[in-house]
Image: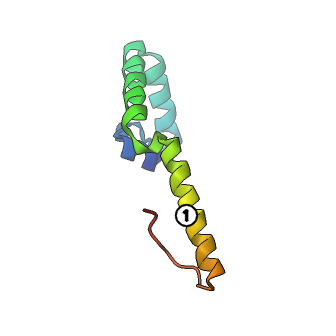
Amino acid sequence: MATSLNHHLGFGEMNAGSDQAYIEMAVRLAQDPAGLSALRARVGEARKTSGLFDMAGYAHDFESALTTMFKRHEAGYDAEDFEVT
């Protein structure tokens, strides 16, 4: 899941292919305060612009999904995929 989130946020370079690669990346960042600071700044910007951090929007969409599912169930429909708009 973290790989998908990193990719969506534009942080593909943070995906490690192995435990050892992850450890090496963590050590590199720990030894590079400027690089770590730049990464933190990028994450801060991503938090402002990405829908992944829009909790109010997520809550609204989740509520819409639950309402739709309940209404479909009450009407006797079988479960199926639907889009939340």
Could you say which is closer to the camera, residue 14 or residue 23?
Answer: 14
Residue placed furthest toward the top? 33
Q: Is residue 17 visible?
A: no
**Residue at 41%, 17% in the rendered image:** 37
**x, y percentage for residue 44?**
42, 27
- Amino acid type, label 1: Ala
Identify the residue under disc 1. Answer: 65
Q: Quadrant of residue 6?
A: top left
The image quarter containing residue 63 is: bottom right
**Quadrant assignment for the C terminus:** bottom left
Secondary structure category for the residue under label 1: helix
Here the colouring is rainbow
Front residue of 44/72: it is 72
* Residue at position x 49%, y 27% in the image: 26
Left or right for 1, reference 49: right
Residue 12 placement, left or right of 84:
left
In the figure, is residue 41 to the left or right of 76?
left
Residue 85 drawn above or below residue 18: below
Residue 17 pos. (x, y %): 44, 45
**Residue at x-position 51% and y-position 49%:** 58
How many C-alpha atoms fall within 10 Å of the one at disc 1: few (<14), some, or many (≥20)?
Answer: some
Residue with the most extreme right position: 74
The total of numbered circles placed on residues is 1
Q: Is residue 8 visible?
A: yes
Q: Position of residue 39 (x, y in %)?
A: 39, 25
- Identify whether 69 is placed above or below 31: below
Residue 83 in the figure: left or right of residue 66: left
Relative to 43, does residue 75 appear above or below in the rendering? below
